[in-house]
């Protein structure tokens, strides 16, 4: 049985063995190690970036919800606003005068960064649908957000998900409204 010995190998085989041991294997090992380290670093960086983006989104959502709750409570506790939307107007001109003198000023400047739109719905038949105030019609009563909100009986605002949007809905029943129902919807 022949022994494996470098003295009996051909020069070509010795050079090939030396190339494989001193050049090829170290390059392959170095590349594998470099690839594993780089891919691990990129994976951890992507995970860290995704975590930071999720935290930023969570904070932005929290700020937006806090702003919406603040706006809903400011309108909920405003006695002049509640009295105005529950008052029975004698004519359209009287309502327009009340809208221009108080309600329009109440609504202007209330838009916050995360709140796209807000709407007051009331079943007061003497109020005209205009700007941020709308009548509580059968279409609104059959809408998804209204049906979901009717399941809540709590006095605080409810977060409703409908039509791929989040809405904060608040009953405006802080004061005696004479049987009129009013709701504030912030989208």
Image (tube, rainbow, N blue to C red):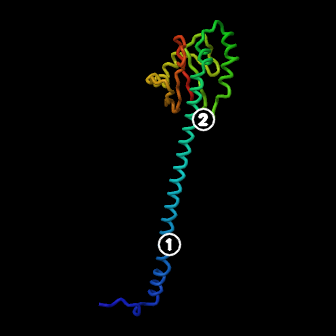
- In x, y percent, where is residue 106? 66, 23
First in sequence, mark 2 or 1: give its number: 1
User: Which residue is at a point 53% across and 42% down the rendered structure image?
Assistant: 58
- In x, y percent, where is residue 148? 46, 25
- Secondary-structure class at tag 2: loop
User: Which residue is at a point 57% across and 12% down the rendered structure image?
Assistant: 124
Disc 1 target residue? 30
- In x, y percent, where is residue 152? 45, 24
Q: Quadrant of the N terminus?
A: bottom left
User: Which residue is at a point 60% across and 9% down the rendered structure image?
Assistant: 88
- In x, y percent, where is residue 120? 58, 21
Extreme top residue here?
Answer: 90
Quick one: label 1, few (<14), some, or many (20+) residues within 10 Å? few
- Where, by quadrant of the figure, is residue 60 drawn? top right
- Secondary-structure class at tag 1: helix
Where is 44 relative to 172, above or below? below
Q: CA distance from mark 2 to mark 1?
A: 51 Å
Q: Nearer the viewer, residue 74 or 129?
A: 74
Q: Nearer the viewer, residue 56 or 16?
A: 56
Disc 2 target residue? 114
């Amino acid at each position: 049985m022949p022994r494996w010995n470098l003295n009996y190998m051909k020069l070509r085989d010795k050079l090939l063995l030396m190339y494989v041991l001193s050049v090829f294997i170290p390059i392959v090992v170095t590349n594998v190690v470099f690839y594993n380290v780089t891919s691990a670093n990129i994976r951890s960086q992507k995970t860290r970036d995704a975590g930071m983006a999720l935290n930023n989104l969570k904070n932005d959502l929290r700020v937006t919800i806090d702003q919406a709750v603040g706006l809903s409570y400011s309108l909920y506790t405003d006695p002049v606003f509640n009295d105005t939307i529950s008052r029975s107007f004698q004519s359209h001109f009287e309502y327009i005068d009340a809208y221009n003198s108080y309600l329009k000023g109440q609504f202007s400047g209330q838009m916050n960064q995360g709140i796209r739109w807000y709407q007051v719905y009331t079943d007061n038949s003497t109020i005209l649908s205009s700007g941020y105030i709308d009548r509580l019609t059968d279409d609104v009563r059959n809408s998804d957000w209204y049906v979901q909100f009717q399941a809540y009986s709590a006095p605080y605002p409810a977060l409703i998900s409908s039509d791929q949007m989040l809405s904060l809905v608040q009953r405006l029943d802080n004061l005696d409204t004479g049987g009129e129902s009013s709701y504030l919807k912030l989208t």
